[in-house]
Image (tube, grey):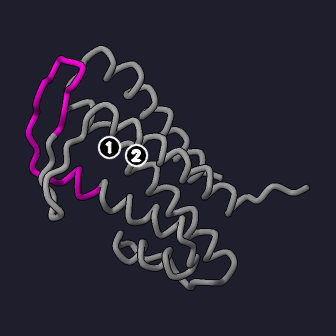
Amino acid sequence: MDFLQESREDLKRADHLLYVSLKYTRTVDVIRSIVMRLISSIGYSIELLLKNAKDKKKIKEIPPQTGLKCEIVKKVYNDPKITEMVEFYLLLRKISKAEYKKTNEYRRHVTMIATIDKGILDINMDLIKEFYQKTNEYVDYVESITYPKKE
């Protein structure tokens, strides 16, 4: 349950950053902080999936490298939603490491313009909310897989 709790804690922090900090400060630094919290939350979810697979003897060990973890999770679970989550996780990681510019700081339309290999991505308040909601859905889905409800 530790990985799930950590994932939920990071989501709570992201929620606060999104609905309190970003609302009042409107800076790109807060957007970057939200991205980092979402990465952390999904990272814990991936760890939970790997631990679950190891407990069920589907894999022998959990690799330390992020790329290998992602590949193993996609192969072991072979689920379109999990694959989508892993791809989203890798996109967020690219965004966090990307060169970026700031526009409209301290205004409603504050935007982080990140340059990634796929092109330029404008991350504004609306898009970061979508990212947060998507991450929340993924964490719920991972919980439903790893801790299915008994009826």
Say if 37 sits above or below 56 in the image: above
Q: Position of residue 111 (x, y in %)?
A: 19, 33
Magenta residues span 93-112
At a point 17% along the width and 38% down the height, the residue shown is 112
Say if 134 sits above or below 26 in the image: below
Whether label 1 touches label 2, CB < 8 Å: yes
Q: CA distance from mark 1 to mark 2?
A: 5 Å
Q: Which mark is residue 38?
A: 2
Residue, disc 1: 35
Answer few, some or many: residues within 10 Å of disc 2's Cα (few below 14, many 20 plus, some between 14 and 19). many
Give the structural element (helix, strand or loop) at label 1. Answer: helix
Q: Position of residue 135 (x, y in %)?
A: 47, 48
Q: Is residue 77 magenta?
A: no
The residue type indicated by label 2 comes to Leu
Locate the C terminus and report the quarter of the image it occupies.
bottom right
Q: Which mark is residue 7?
A: none
Give the structural element (helix, strand or loop) at label 2. Answer: helix
Q: Is residue 101 left or right of residue 20?
A: left
Say if 109 sits above or below 131 in the image: above
